[in-house]
Image (cartoon, rainbow, N blue to C red):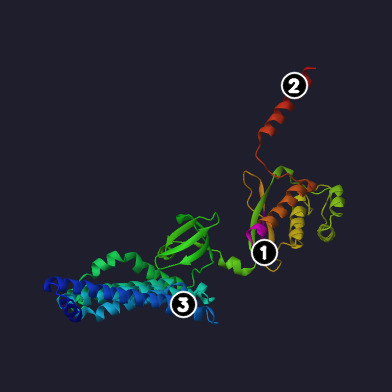
Amino acid sequence: MNYINNLLLKFDIDPTLAGYLSIILMILFIAVICIAANFITKKVVIRVITHIVKNNKFTWDTMLLERRVFHKLSHFVPAIIIYYFAPTFPSYQELIEKSAVAYLIIMGLMVMNSLLNAINDIYQTYDISKVKPIKGYIQVVNIIVITLGVVLVIANLVGKSPLVFLSGIGALSAILMLVFKDSLLGLVAGIQLASNDMVRVGDWIEMPKYGANGDIIDISLNTVKVQNFDKTITMIPSYAMISDSFINWRGMQTSGGRRIKRSLFIDINSIAFCTEEMIRKFNTIEYLSDHIIEREREIAEYNTKNDINRSNPVNGRALTNIGVFRAYISNYIQHHPGINQEMSLMVRQLEPTEHGLPLEIYAFSNDIRWAVYESVQADIFDHLFAVAQEFGLRIFQNPSGHDLKTIVDESKREVMKYRN
């Protein structure tokens, strides 16, 4: 700057004005150098790096490029130039140097933030990331880095040692714990979730308290993000996954079968012993012929052995339409192509209720996809509702308006018939 000032004085310019002009020219000169350096860095160096990254076989450097790590590093160059030229302005040298260092620290924090995010992106390309996500830990490291960066910036600006401020943080620990309460709880919860393998990205969870019923799409330090089946997003605090109960359907998804547990309600008044005509009819049913023959032989042997008088159907053993229907359902689902035959399968009676006798089917579909599962379940019950009457059974249903109208019409006809 002295050179510029002396050069201006040779043109007989007032010394005071020459001093101001030299400062302005020096600032413009530094600005031009910074702009040129930044331009060269971004338009040349960054383009070369981008070309190298896009034309190699590695994927991790692509993540660094997408997170703009190299672009943010380019901001270091102007700050370094300004710091280097600070002695040119003796009166403001300290302020310029502190400002340049503060800017370098801030840009360093931004680079670290992008780098940590890129590390998380790289980690997510591996299958283990679904089992052991590290996003929460990355966020903890980020908080620590930002905290230390803020301390360094303040220490640099006031001209004190960073240790002075770090020692003061101990006295503020109670306030810090209050401010970062959710983050600390989330960190502890994240460790427990990961170590116990409680949830993974992609798991289907159900948590009615928070209105969550869908797939986990992200696990972070403070929240677990769930995309519900209606495409809405539910955010659940990480620590809530430890303190509250939830259902994780991963076991069902990995088992290869999805449970069917539904009942038919049979009108108890329609249950009866099988007549000879009914038995002959049942013998023609594909899934029942062998069962009927075997049961008839077994019952005949028992009644003969115990000298049972079968003139009264109450005596001894006999087939019932509900028992035959239960056997038919069992054989039907054993031959159904949508049922997993390697998993639990049974047809059982539950305790009778005011709605009739529940006949429950307990089985597993061999396809866990929701639409396929519902299709298999509907196919089975469509058939059973239709064939129940073939066994002399009625499916229970509370009287509808049509039923009441039919009763009234029949009553009117009976009254008219009586009068006539």
> In terms of secondary structure, where does tag 3 sit?
helix
Q: Which residue is mark 3?
A: 47
* 176 vs 247, nearest the viewer: 176
Q: Amino acid at mark 1?
A: Asp
Q: CA distance from mark 1 to mark 2?
A: 57 Å
Mark 2, residue position: 415
* Viewer-nearest of discs 2 and 3: 3
* Horizontal side, residue 60 vs residue 325: left or right: left
Q: Position of residue 98 (x, y in %)?
A: 22, 76
Q: Position of residue 118 (x, y in %)?
A: 44, 75
- In the rendered image, the quadrant that contains the N terminus is bottom left
Residue type at mark 3: give it: Arg
Q: Give residue 328's quadrant in the image.
A: bottom right
Q: Residue furthest front?
A: 11
Q: Residue at x 67, y 64 (%)?
A: 367
The answer to whether residue 408 is above or below residue 86 is above
Amino acid type, residue under disc 2 in the picture: Val
Tell me if 110 is positioned left or right of 319 in this view. Answer: left
Q: Secondary structure at mark 2?
A: helix
Mark 1 = which residue? Answer: 367
